[in-house]
Image: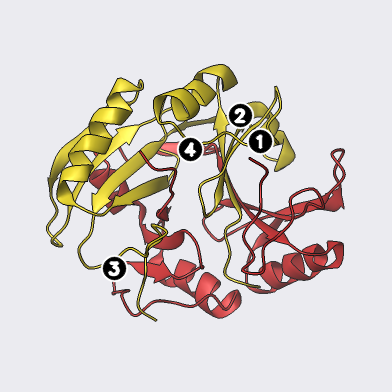
Chain colours: A red, B yellow
Amino acid sequence: MDARISLITLGVAELDRARRFYRDGLSWPLSSASTDEVAFFRTGGAVLALWPRPLLAADANLPPEGSGFGGIALAHNVATRERVDAVMAEAVAAGGTVLKTPADAEWGGYTGYFADPDGYPWEVAWNPFFPMAPDGSLQLPE
Amino acid sequence: MDARISLITLGVAELDRARRFYRDGLSWPLSSASTDEVAFFRTGGAVLALWPRPLLAADANLPPEGSGFGGIALAHNVATRERVDAVMAEAVAAGGTVLKTPADAEWGGYTGYFADPDGYPWEVAWNPFFPMAPDGSLQLPE
């Protein structure tokens, strides 16, 4: 199996609200492949999809119930420490919620967390030890 | 904010077990940036990280409790219908659990789901409408 994550799908309570947050609030490019039922965002890497939560659970053949921390966090790395504060401010202006105010991390970076309208946690991180390629992807050592 | 997902971190119950599943079972390339506390896999796109769940929750300043469907699904797209069955079999041999046996999807593809050892759902999908680039990434229309 190739090491590849093609899509990340967030099961959302209100598709309109979630789409507005990513498309209008964060200015992410909505793909024309989107429909009234699902939104796809082109990110240069793994596609971000938004889909009503009950439909996603049913598609995976899982009971839709769930509460509390879902166990997964997404991260958006930036090239400078200053960009962490700027991106956090942009996310809050878009309707996100601050989970953790940016602070120095013990491993030497600078990170904060916001939650999207459905509560999914996003870390915004400056990590001087994981250099970024020109396309924004992380360059991990082998 | 650029449209970019840098890392996806799964909060895991037993790091050893999760690392074995992805590294030994699925043959994903573990980065030397990994430590005894965290595993990083290079995927060509968003990095997959494994980290003990309580540490991830604490990092995001969230209560660690949670149960049921976490609301997020990851997807691994493949180039042919036959590869869906092959990847599902590989995941099961590695210790994954079948959530949904591969079947024709009403939108015209062919997909199944497996759960990793922590229960995180992975869709394995052949989608003839989302062509794959030579590097394996999806090429969504603008």
Q: Which residue is mark 2?
A: B53
- B133, above or below B15, in the image: below
- Mark 1 residue type: Ala
Q: Quadrant of residue A63?
A: top left
What is the spatial separation of the Cα atoms under label 4 and label 3, in whole angstroms?
Answer: 23 Å
**Residue at 64% across / 65% down in the picture?**
A136
Residue B41, position as x, y percentages in the image:
56, 39
- Mark 3 residue type: Glu
Tell me whether marks 2 and 1 sit on the same chain: yes
CB-based contact (under 8 Å), mark 1 and mark 4: no
Decide if residue A54 is in sight here.
yes
- Mark 2 residue type: Arg
- A11, above or below B87, in the image: below
What is the spatial separation of the Cα atoms under label 3 and label 2, in whole angstroms?
Answer: 32 Å
10 Å crowding of disc 3: few (<14), some (14-19), many (20+): few
The residue lying toward the viewer, choosing from A114 and B141, is: B141
Q: Which residue is mark 3?
A: A37
Q: Chain of mark 2?
A: B
CB-based contact (under 8 Å), mark 3 and mark 2: no
Q: Quadrant of residue B102?
A: top left
Q: Which of label 3 and label 2 is nearer to you?
A: 2
Quarter of the picture holding the N terminus of chain A: top left
What is the spatial separation of the Cα atoms under label 1 and label 4, in whole angstroms?
Answer: 14 Å
CB-based contact (under 8 Å), mark 4 and mark 3: no
Q: Secondary structure at mark 3?
A: loop
What is the spatial separation of the Cα atoms under label 3 and label 1, in whole angstroms?
Answer: 31 Å
Q: Which residue is mark 1?
A: B57
B115 sits to left or right of B32:
left
Tell me whether marks 1 and 4 sit on the same chain: no
10 Å crowding of disc 2: few (<14), some (14-19), many (20+): many
**Residue at 70% across / 60% down in the picture?**
A132
Q: Secondary structure at mark 2?
A: helix
